[in-house]
Image (cartoon, rainbow, N blue to C red):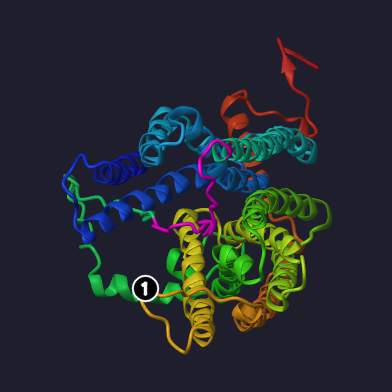
Amino acid sequence: MGAAMNLAGYLMIYLAIDGRTARPPVWLMCIYICVGANSQSFANTGALVTCVKNFPESRGMVLGLLKGFVGLSGAIFTQLYLAIYGDDAKSLVLLIAWLPAAISILFVHTIRIMPYPRRGRGAGSAAAATSNDAFFCFLYISIALAIYLLVMIVVQKQEYKIQKELEESIREPPTVTVENPAASLQMASAAEPPAAKSQQKQSTTTGENGTEPPPPPPSRSSCLGSCLRHMFSPPAQGDDFTILQALVSVDMLVLFLATICGIGGTLTAIDNMGQIGQSLGYQAKSINTFVSLISIWNYAGRVTAGFASEIFLARYRFPRPLMLTLVLLLSCAGHLLIAFGVPHSLYAASVVIGFCFGAQWPLLFAIISEVFGLKYYSTLYNFGSVASPIGAYVLNVRVAGALYDAEAAKQHGGSLDAGGDKTCIGVQCFRKAFLIITAATVAAVLVSLVLVWRTRNFYKGDIYAKFRDNAAADDDDDAEEEGPKWPKKEAEGESTSVNGRKG
């Protein structure tokens, strides 16, 4: 489904901008964009949820790796686009249309739920360490890939600079170009919850030996009443919640509010980094550096949070919600650097914001899988992603955007004409907005501490013990099925007889 939506949506966009179809109306183009953009939710959910269910004891590492590769995907697509199509901007949309769809179709049969590995008793930690070796190999590969991409980006920028200087030197008369970049980085995850509903099979056959027919199915009202009763009676933390039980739980509400403020604040800084640099007087080259720093440190935050939280949890029982609290607290430093406009501090702010934005995602998804179980993880995972657009709308559009426009209007005579200059210059352009964002993030820190307190006993125990116990139980069942048919009497103090003799 994701491949079909991706190909259909972006291919229609490409045909429209290339003039191969009639110019579509705005509403139709919006539908194309909606179909293409939401396709990633299907592919993302199918791959990520499956991997978490296949490796429940290493879910932090799995989430960190997968989200880290998502952070690198933009740079990867850029290199593939330049290698295949050169500098043809329209062909970038064509590449986005066919390449993800082709990859999904090619590897769709490898994405499946695998049986949980059965381990001998007492070999849990050693076997877990062995299984984690593969994830560290993928980590080293991703680090090498990130370094390669960073080097390629730097080299390409230098080549473009040299080429531009040569072109300008042979022009007569010489021309002066003024760059006015509008740097933006799109990292919101669209959430389209997939259907994850259980089916109840009912027997409709009646016995032929005079037995009573089965009772009629319960009415819709009784099913609704039972559902509402169970909705407010959740199981223990770590067990499988139903979708409604999870959505109305205090833990989900607390986590959702903390994520809205945390991810919404860092996403606001990322989306406005171009205007922030421009308002503080940074050159175009520096602004491009900020965007690159955010991209690289976004990847670093994802893999670091995934691996570090898993290691600290396994060795020291360090709760993952507390690590989320620390990440939120660290992001406040980046927001304050932007708010006060400390000279040359935007470099450090880009690193902090990029790292914290990336680090929140694997922590969020790991906490959801641990507290609410894996049975309905597909739906709950996508519900957690909804916090990103909500936070971005509130803090980016309603707070930062409105305050920036108001300050720009003051600098341009009290009003902003539709065709006039809307640029705001000075530290005051974003000061109020990021002070408000800092206050919201501090509130998120306090809210997340509530989740830390509520889950303290849960994370003190072995949260992965049930997976090992289930595997051990399966081993015992198989041993009973494959064992000898005669009973052994050693346990009763009696000896067995072999060929008529007692051993």
Q: Is 400 in front, or is 301?
A: 400
State left or right for residue 39 relative to residue 69.
left
Lateral position of residue 502 relative to residue 74, left or right: right
Q: Main secondary structure of the magenta part?
A: loop
Is 306 above or below relative to 221? above
Nearer the observer, 294 or 208: 294
The spot of residue 199 in percent (x, y) is 33, 53
Asked if 477 appears above or below 409 in the picture, the reply is above
Which quarter of the picture shows residue 127? top right
Image point 47% across, 56% down: which residue?
A: 376
Estimate how packed mark 1 is, as few (under 14), some (14 to 19) or many (20 or more) residues with alpha carbons within 10 Å.
few
Stretch in magenta: 169-193
Residue at the extreme front: 173
x then y, percent, for residue 24: 19, 53
Classify residue 500 by image quadrant.
top right
Q: What quarter of the picture does the N terminus occupy?
A: top left
Residue 189 among those drawn in magenta: yes
Give the vertical position of 261 relative to 348 (above or below). below
Residue 200 appearing in the image: no
The residue singled out by tag 1 in the image is 419
| Residue pictured at 73% horizontal, 30% vertical | 489
| Along the viewing direction, whichever of 171 and 409 lies nearer the viewer | 171
Q: In the rendered image, which quarter is residue 279 located in?
A: bottom right
- Per the image, is 148 magenta? no
Label 1 SS: loop
64 on left or right of 200? right
- Pick the front one: 82 or 364: 82
Q: Residue at x 47, y 67 (%)?
A: 389
